[in-house]
Amino acid sequence: MSAKPLLLVVACALVDTDRRVLIAQRPEGKSMAGLWEFPGGKVEPGETPEAALIRELHEELGIETKEACLAPLSFVSHAYENIHLLMPLYVCRRWQGTPEAREHIALKWVRPQALRDYPMPPADEPLIAALCDLL
Ligand SMILES: Nc1nc2c([nH]c(=O)n2[C@H]2C[C@H](O)[C@@H](COP(=O)(O)OP(=O)(O)OP(=O)(O)O)O2)c(=O)[nH]1
């Protein structure tokens, strides 16, 4: 049995004062296009997960946050066809700026119980339950 490469991706649930969570729709041309995801992305070599997430939040949404504002919530370990995804999910309640879709089709603020109304990557399912418990 040949092992699949392990892919480390960091993701973030931005939570607003109404306890809604930001999800973002993946663009055309990427895998899983059209599905809704938590903002985030791959951890580059030499990067800490937190630094990667702060970078991705800036690149994707144009917002600024800092490590002290990132609280680990849960993680998923999910076998996709070609890779094995390891994805920690952080919760962030404090940031500067207003999120805008710089790399996604659309953004949406959603109550945790309504996340299941939006098609998300298969790996994300357990994270919805974790967010419903938290919020
Ligand atoms: N950011 C993010 N990625 C997720 C989530 N769920 C999930 O399976 N993923 C996967 C999709 C991608 O394979 C990978 C994130 O990669 P990425 O966003 O940095 O890069 P990408 O879309 O260009 O990746 P790809 O086209 O090569 O698949 O993690 C999620 O909720 N948020």
Image (tube, rainbow, N blue to C red):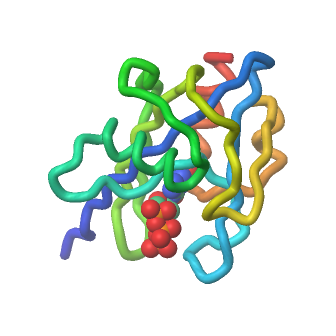
User: What residue is rendered at 40% in x and 39% in y?
Assistant: 88
Query: Split into 4 quadrants, where in the image is the N terminus?
Result: bottom left
User: What residue is rendered at 76% in x and 27% in y?
Assistant: 20
Residue 123 makes an appearance in the image? no
Q: Can you tell which quarter of the image residue 94 is in?
A: top right
User: What residue is rendered at 64% in x and 35% in y?
Assistant: 97
Query: Split into 4 quadrants, where in the image is the C terminus?
Result: top right
Relative horizontal placement of residue 85, taking residue 40 as reference (left or right): left
Q: Position of residue 119 (x, y in %)?
A: 75, 57
Q: Position of residue 109 (x, y in %)?
A: 79, 38
Observer-nearest of 25 and 4: 25
Residue 58 makes an appearance in the image? yes
Observer-nearest of 33 and 18: 18
Residue at the far left in the pictured view = 46
- Label tally: 0
Observer-nearest of 132 and 23: 23
Q: Can you tell which quarter of the image residue 35 is in?
A: bottom right
Q: Quick check: 79 above or below 10? A: below
Q: Position of residue 74 (x, y in %)?
A: 45, 30
